[in-house]
Amino acid sequence: MSLNPATAITAMDDDPRRYEHLSAIRLEDPDAIARAAKARRRHPGPKSGTQNFIVAADHPARGALAVGNDPVAMADRRQLLDRLQIALANPDVDGILASPDIMDDLLLLGALDGKLLFGSMNRGGLSGLVNEFDDRFTGHTAAALEALGADGGKMLTRICLGDPDTVATLEATAKTIDSLAERKLIAMVEPFLSVREHGKVRNDLSTNAVIKSVAIAEGLGSTSAYTWMKLPVVAGMERVMAATTMPTVLLGGDPDSSQDDVFASWEAALALPGVQGLTVGRTLLYPHDGDVAGAVATAASLLNRSAQRTLSTRPASTRTAEVSE
């Protein structure tokens, strides 16, 4: 009872029963998820000089449902699955970053054949929680990702120098990096220097703060052999990328500027050495004009798909808005 990727939807459907079969499968045949994972054709794997395009969909598991001015934009699971299937139907989209619930839905829908799979591992630092920096690992484990046939796991690593919970998050992140490396799985680490202001967590997107977060994050774990960075696009990306030799994917966040400006900033950053591609969610799944397929196609056109990288002279964006993943 899955959709054929070749006939994946191209427009969002209003039928409230369109995913009713997922509930029936979960009720009567929960092992179908493991079978779908085992039968799935895998992606050939990342290659140097060929940038990857990964769609992110792990926000709801942290209670982060807002997009722009809509506080519950990502709350409707049926609409989210519609949008994800539209994005994944584009052959230039290499994979998905998702929490276990969404990953399982997409496996049952047959939408992940030939895709990279990254599980979202720590979703315990709920958006707005009083102890949000105590970001516990409540999602995928390294063992579960291995069993799933996934390519790696992602961990949000917010570093607040004024909050004692940060040290526990750093320790848990280090142990998880080791657990993934033991299985030869990628650890996609998403670091931020963060502060709490007026009861809300804000990520510092100044150039120096991002550089410092990279320096801390890339030293976590007993090996960095399988570690990637997942970083925001900020002013001075040349300096940011000079801070690491690790493969790096760019995140999108919830933009506060025009879509054209966002795409321009990505284009400039994608031309820098070490940038392996994009891992973007809300910007493409919930574009201002509602055209998911168009936004995905535009983002895909920015990626370098050849072995020869051409450097762009276009200046990077100076955007320093709040990013929350």
Image (cartoon, rainbow, N blue to C red):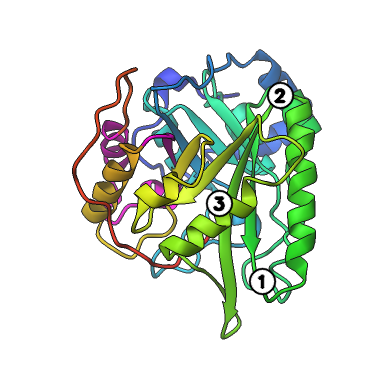
Give the structural element (helix, strand or loop) at label 3: helix
Q: Which residues are magenta?
A: 273-302
Asked if 105 appears above or below 80 in the picture, the reply is: above
State which tag comes first along the sequence, 2 or 3: 2
Q: Nearer the viewer, residue 14 or 233?
A: 233
Mark 2 is on which residue type?
Lys
Dot in front, 2 or 3: 3
Q: Residue at x 55, y 49 (%)?
A: 77
Label 1, residues with CA under 10 Å away: few <14, some 14-19, many ≥20: few
Q: Position of residue 265 (x, y in %)?
A: 28, 50
State which tag comes first along the sequence, 2 or 1: 1
Instruction: Report the residue marked by disc 3.
Output: 214
Location of the C terminus (image quadrant): bottom right
* Residue 161, numbered circle: 1
Location of the N terminus (image quadrant): top right
Dot in front, 2 or 1: 1
State which tag comes first along the sequence, 3 or 1: 1
The image quarter in which residue 21 lies: top right
Q: Position of residue 148 (x, y in %)?
A: 71, 26
Asked if 28 appears above or below 278 in the picture, the reply is: above
